[in-house]
Amino acid sequence: MKLYTYFRSSAAFRVRIALNLKGLKPEQVFVHLRKNEQGSAPYRGINPQGLVPTLEHDGRSFGQSLAIAEYLDEIVPEPPLLPARAAERARVRQLADIVACDIHPLGNLRVLRYLRDRMGQNEEAVADWQRHWIALGLEAFEDLVAGSSDTGRFCHKDKPTLADIFLIPQLANARRAQLDLAPFPTLLRIEETALALPAFADALPKNQPDAE
Amino acid sequence: MKLYTYFRSSAAFRVRIALNLKGLKPEQVFVHLRKNEQGSAPYRGINPQGLVPTLEHDGRSFGQSLAIAEYLDEIVPEPPLLPARAAERARVRQLADIVACDIHPLGNLRVLRYLRDRMGQNEEAVADWQRHWIALGLEAFEDLVAGSSDTGRFCHKDKPTLADIFLIPQLANARRAQLDLAPFPTLLRIEETALALPAFADALPKNQPDAE
């Protein structure tokens, strides 16, 4: 198993957490996003989107952190990243998807570059944009977890799931964008619980071999 | 079962296809996005994101079309929306996620409004933005399906999967954004096959009771 990764990519961060929870240690290949290595022809050969992460396993390679996390959960069922009941799985996936679909894509490096280079937005406008979408998504996430009896020490009961795997990297991004996290007490409490686990802490950007 | 929907929402379009494939006919509640009904307090009570679609079932409600489609596939296993083998499931999910995570969020109504109202972009710049992200995502999608022996009459072999459920609404959006679709022959061929099925055709925006 081989993971194409970049320390600061929050999508790679998610996959690192999932791998750690499953006890998997793939070979890592570092793709330097700020040097645009992801756009090179060899990398596009294995990931036509030119995005990280990509997982190679059993002669196949695929991108998209959600698809990779679900794959890891299927090939290594323990510990499960999703609850057993369909309705609970839907709750966990909804939470993960808020991050994956409605927060993170808007703060992607290539999107911020477009705003700067093609729409002439200055750094302040770009930072406002980032904080706007992160805040909007985290408000819904906080509402959903603060208001549910399914929430435990983690987003869903007392074990980490896909929801936590997606939440924790997003909170790190939120801090980098200097968003005030005080309005999200439940998320901060879950973050503290998660980062006490080596599976989460070892996956932090600063703990990666390619960290700068 | 109850679906909160809007004819023109492509996320709702996806869920309508999944419901049709499963032979499910939930009660429909129409939420008028251009009148901002999704932002109303009662709707936010069931979907704190204020986005459509939302599915209500068995006393629970959840948003996010990916989570809803996976849920429908779990509670009504036939016909399956995902292949049986993990590696093939990952391939199908990767394709669906390209649309769900990397194309659609950037063309969402609220995002286009932000570009216009808060970044002062004119209609041409907003249209260029839409086409840019759709083209980028569809190019990767086309590469992945055109280059794989797993591709059949549909994105994955000869039956519709999550990948088709996400692709077809995105192609409709691409046309509305006046993107030239000639560079995507495999996707157009799959679209023609899919729209020949009532499950896809009946889910088209123009065929909804709330269509304008």
Image (cartoon, coloured by chain):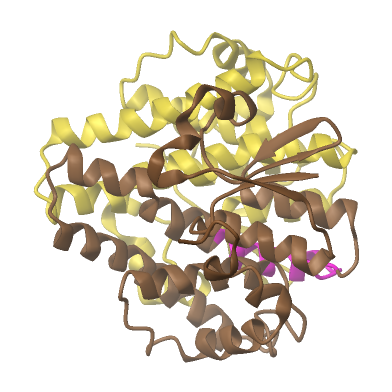
Chain colours: A brown, B yellow
Q: Quadrant of the C terminus of chain A?
A: bottom left
Judge left or right: residue A84 versus residue A109.
Answer: right
Q: Is residue A81 magenta?
A: yes
Q: Where A21 falls versus A49 (above or below)?
A: below
Magenta stretch: helix, strand or loop mostly = helix
In percent of width and height, residue B27 lies at 62, 55
Q: Position of residue B205 (x, y in %)?
A: 46, 34
Name the residue at 59% across, 42% down.
B97
Give how far across and how far down residue B25 sits, in percent: 69, 47
Task: Choose top left, top right, bottom left or bottom right for residue A155.
Answer: bottom right
Residue at 76 percent across and 15 percent down: it is B152
Residue at position x 53%, y 68% in the image: A169
Q: Position of residue B145 (x, y in %)?
A: 65, 20
Can residue B28 be seen by looking at this rendering?
no
Residue nearer the viewer, B150 or B162: B150
Q: Foreground residue, A105 or B43?
A: A105
Q: Which residues are magenta?
A: A80-97
Residue B68 in view in this figure: yes
Q: Quick one: quadrant of the N terminus of chain A?
A: top right
Q: In terms of image quadrants, where is residue B167? A: top right
Residue A121 belongs to magenta span: no
